[in-house]
Amino acid sequence: MPSVETAKKIADVFEVTLDYMIDEAATVIFDKKTVKRIQDIDILNPDDRKHLFAMMDAFLRDAKTKQAYAS
C-alpha cells in the first residue's frame, strides 16, 4: 500500500485523480483538466455561471441532436 504522497505522485503521472485510482466502482471518471474546470466554474459569480451553463446546455443539446439524426 503506497503512502498518500506516493499515490498522489502516481496519479499525477497518469493524469488522474486519487478517487479514480482507489474507486473500483466509479462510473464517472474525470481527468484532471475537467476537475480543474469544474473547480473554476464553482468560483464564478452566479450570473457568469448561469451564462456559461446556458452556452453549455445549447452546445450539448445541438451535439445530442446531431448524434440522434446520425443514427
Image: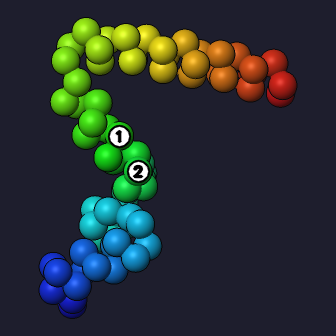
Indicate the quadrant containing the N terminus: top left, top right, bottom left or bottom right. Answer: bottom left
Under circle 1, the secondary element is helix
Disc 2 + disc 1, Cβ < 8 Å: yes
Q: Is the residue marked by circle 2 packed among few (<14), some (14-19), or many (20+) residues within 10 Å?
A: few
Q: Whole-percent x and y of residue 32?
A: 37, 56
State the residue at coordinates (24%, 75%): 8
Examine the image and state in which quarter residue 44 appears: top left
Q: Considering only vertical position in the picture, is 4 above or below 41?
A: below
- Tell me if I can see residue 23 in this picture: no
Q: Considering only vertical position in the picture, is 70 above or below 37?
A: above
State the residue at coordinates (19%, 30%): 43
* 33 horizontally vs 39: left or right: right
**What's the amino acid at mark 1?**
Arg
**What's the amino acid at mark 2?**
Lys
* 26 horizontally vs 39: left or right: right
- Tell me if I can see residue 67 in this picture: yes
Which colour style is shown?
rainbow
Indicate the quadrant containing the C terminus: top left, top right, bottom left or bottom right. Answer: top right
Q: Which residue is mark 2?
A: 33
Nearer to me, 46 or 17 = 46
Q: Whole-percent x and y of residue 22?
A: 29, 70
Examine the image and state in which quarter residue 23 appears: bottom left
State the residue at coordinates (43%, 11%): 54
CA–CA distance in space, label 2 to label 1: 6 Å
Furthest residue to the bottom? 1
Q: Which residue is mark 1?
A: 37
